[in-house]
Image (cartoon, rainbow, N blue to C red):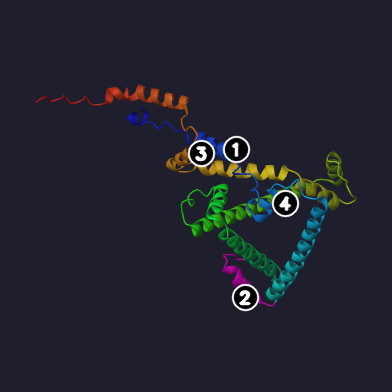
Amino acid sequence: CCERSGVNPYVQEVLADRAVRAEHAAGRFARPAPSSSGPAARASAAPGDAGNDVVEALLASEASRKREAERKKVEEAAAASKRKELSAMSVDQLKELLSSRGIEIAGKKDELVELAFKVRVQDEVVAARRGELRAMATDDLRDVAKNCKVVAALTGKKNALVDAVLAHEAKAREDARAFDAKAEEVLAQWAAELEEKSGAELKDICAGKGLRPGVSKEDRVRAIVQNWRAGRAVDAAVIESRRAARTAELALAALDDLLAVCKGLGIDTVVKEVMVGRLLAHEEEHGRAEDEAPAAAPVVRK
């Protein structure tokens, strides 16, 4: 009926709000959870054997502790070697290395070395993860892809599955970094607001939170910020900020794009009261759609 009358039955702001509420319920704006598909996660989820002898369990635990200590030693030595290698590079070489990874940054050499070190470590983690995924049976790999909601690659070959899972995990890491960066922005803003308060006001805030107020104003600001960092208030503020930004984005999106988002979320796009009101207003001005339609051509019988 709306199509025949040329009436738009949609309200962009309502659709945007409904879409964002559905995305919020699905966890789109929450702090990204760490991947739980790695070997450590699977090992911790594996059921134990209740019949194991206590002595054997203790021996196994001690052996595991020694292996972990040895692994840490090796990792620390490798990290020291990497830092030494990067420190021997010039500032221009470090910038070129980072630029090849799409990272443009100006800073002191120590900062560039630390960032380059993190990039190298991440490269090794990804390489190890790629090897782990390739070593999996195809069915197990498909299970990992399903857990990652990588549906498009499920019918592809093994290499395509591996690439899709790695891409998903890289996106998750990027989302986590973006969330953390926004959280630091929120904390910095709140800390600046605390700096405007008097020492007595800060002392009262500390008392209300059960914190030791310390002696100086800086001590009190630091205690309050640490309390915020450990709690949920910062995450809640980031979630609200991300949600508001998404609402504004969808409210300005092309209607077809917004309808596609709503369809993907399985939400109702009709606002019945608005649709009825617009149809009635159109009919008052132009008449009913049936009245406007041309009469059907008579059937010619041979």
Q: Secondary structure at mark 3?
A: helix
Q: Position of residue 123 (x, y in %)?
A: 62, 65
Q: Secondary structure at mark 1?
A: helix
Marked residue nearer the N-terminal end (3 or 1): 1
Q: Secondary structure at mark 4?
A: helix
Q: Is residue 181 left or right of residue 69?
A: left
Q: Do the CB atoms of the residues marked 1 and 2 lie less than 8 Å apart?
A: no
Marked residue nearer the N-terminal end (1 or 4): 1
| Amino acid on which disc 2 is placed | Gln
- Residue named by callout 1: 25
| Amino acid on which disc 3 is placed | Leu
Q: Secondary structure at mark 2?
A: helix
Calculate the distance from the C-alpha at mark 3 to the C-alpha at mark 1.
11 Å
Using the rendered view, name the quadrant where residue 292 is placed. Answer: top left
The residue range painted magenta reads 88-104
Marked residue nearer the N-terminal end (2 or 4): 2
Q: Is residue 80 left or right of residue 206?
A: left
Calculate the distance from the C-alpha at mark 2 to the C-alpha at mark 3.
47 Å
Calculate the distance from the C-alpha at mark 2 to the C-alpha at mark 4.
33 Å
Q: Nearer the viewer, mark 2 or mark 4?
A: 2
| Amino acid on which disc 4 is placed | Ala
- Residue named by callout 3: 265
- Residue named by callout 2: 93
Q: Nearer the viewer, mark 1 or mark 2?
A: 1
Residue located at (56% from left, 43% from top)? 246
Calculate the distance from the C-alpha at mark 1 to the C-alpha at mark 4.
28 Å
- Residue named by callout 4: 188
Question: Of 156 and 118, which appears nearest the observer?
Answer: 156
